[in-house]
Image (spheres, rainbow, N blue to C red):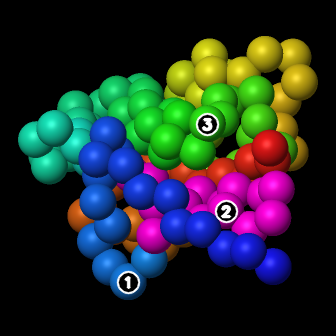
Amino acid sequence: MNKKVIETSAAPAPIGPYSQAVMAGNLLFLSGQVCFDPATGELKNTDVTEETHQVMANLKAVLAEAGMTFDNVVKTTIFLSDMSLFATVNEAYSQYFSSAFPARETVAVKGLPRNVNVEISMIATA
């Protein structure tokens, strides 16, 4: 199987030993993104809605680097700092997909990098 690392400066650089995304066959596995602004390296987290939109912008940039859009996404995982944020994150997240929504799970976790509230990973297909 061919494996290709996908990287773009339009999304935050990894902060550990992982890639922004890896293409394996016709599947693209996108690492979890948080609300880092790639232009400044700062967190965009004045509220959870802003966080979610920045996360989705980062994921969109990685998808674009692979020649894909949110229409190619078949699975997402949303990690929340608290399940009470579910409705707010869901509202922002839903703006990026049409009626053909990807499969998804949303879980609350004890902690996320830099104490953010939202991290989202994706799987897309070509």
Residue kind at label 2, given as amino acid type: Met
Relative to 124, is 92 on the left or the right? left
Give the residue at mark 3: 67
Q: Position of residue 56 (x, y in %)?
A: 49, 35
Q: Earlier in the sequence, mark 2 or mark 1?
A: 1
Q: Would residue 24 be seen by someone viewing this image from the given angle?
A: yes
Task: Write down the quadrant of residue 111 in the picture.
Answer: bottom left
Magenta portion: prevailing SS class: strand
Give the residue at mark 2: 23
Which quadrant: the N terminus?
Answer: bottom right
Residue name at image x 28 percent, y 47 percent: 9
Residue name at image x 38 percent, y 83 percent: 17
Count of numbered labels shown in the rendering = 3
Of residues 76 and 111, the one drawn nearer to the viewer in this rendering? 76
Cβ atoms at labels 1 and 3 below 8 Å apart: no
Q: Residues within 10 Å of mark 2 (few under 14, many from 20)?
A: some
Q: Earlier in the sequence, mark 1 or mark 3?
A: 1
Q: Which residues are magenta?
A: 19-35
Label 2 secondary element: strand
Task: Write down the quadrant of residue 91 in the picture.
Answer: top right
Give the residue at mark 1: 17
Q: Earlier in the sequence, mark 3 or mark 2?
A: 2
